[in-house]
Image: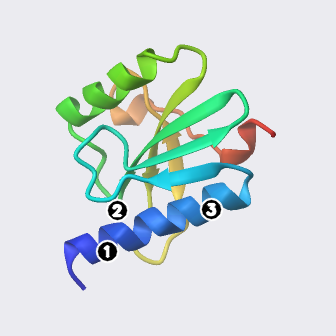
């Protein structure tokens, strides 16, 4: 399976998980922007960067944080990682390093 196919499969797994938690999701196919998935609930917009294992690099993180800053208090920058044969792990991204990002769960905001 190619890297593209693996990435697409993981993006759809994230979409399925977020949808089952009440979000309406859109996948940014062949994403060249900051977010791979955009998920919306009343009062909240998730900007999700999807990775299999490695967190995004500094430039990619900064781009996502800049977009999230355009919707203060509404947009939430999220990293979703799904290593092979493991569940999806979410972290709320911030200006710190990936080790400082707190874990996040999709049910933190209810519809």
**Distance from label 1 to label 2 (Cα)?**
8 Å
Mark 2 or mark 3, earlier in chain: 3
Decide: is 36 above or below 5: above
| Other residues around mark 3 within 10 Å, as few (<14) / some (14–19) / many (≥20) | some
Q: Where on the picture, by quarter, is residue 87? A: bottom right
Q: Is residue 96 above or below residue 11?
A: above
Location of the N terminus by quadrant is: bottom left
Instruction: Tell me the residue at 29%/76% (across/down).
Output: 5
User: Residue 79's x, y, as percent?
Assistant: 43, 44
Residue farthest toward the bottom in the current orientation of the protein: 1
| Location of residue 94 (image quadrant) | top left
| Relative depth, front residue between 101 and 31 | 31
Q: Mark 2 and mark 1 in contact (Cβ < 8 Å)?
A: yes
Asked if residue 104 lies left or right of residue 58, the reply is right
Q: Quadrant of residue 111?
A: top right
Q: Where is mark 2, residue-wise?
A: 52
Q: What SS does tag 3 mark?
A: helix
In front: 22, or 49?
22
Could you tell whether 97 is left or right of 48 in the image? left
Q: CA distance from mark 2 to mark 3?
A: 15 Å
Instruction: Tell me residue 40's x, y (percent).
Output: 62, 40
**Residue 55 sits above or below residue 60 on the image:** below
Image coords of residue 51 (percent x, y): 34, 56
Q: Which residue is mark 3?
A: 17
| Location of residue 93 with respect to 79 vertically, above or below | above
Q: Secondary structure at mark 2?
A: loop
Q: Nearer the viewer, mark 1 or mark 2?
A: 1
Q: Secondary structure at mark 1?
A: helix
Residue plotted at (48% across, 67% down): 12
Residue at mark 1: 6
Residue drawn at the location 40% of the way across and 75% of the way down: 84
């Amino acid at each position: 399976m190619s890297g593209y196919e693996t990435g697409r499969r993981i993006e759809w797994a994230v979409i399925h998980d977020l949808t089952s938690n009440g979000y309406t999701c859109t996948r940014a196919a062949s994403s060249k922007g900051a977010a791979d998935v955009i998920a919306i609930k009343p009062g909240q917009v998730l900007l999700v960067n999807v990775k299999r294992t490695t967190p995004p690099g500094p430039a990619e993180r900064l781009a996502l944080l800049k977009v999230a800053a355009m919707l203060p208090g509404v947009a939430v920058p999220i990293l979703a990682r799904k290593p092979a044969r493991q569940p999806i792990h979410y972290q709320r991204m911030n200006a710190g390093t990936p080790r400082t990002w707190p874990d996040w769960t999709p049910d933190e905001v209810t519809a």
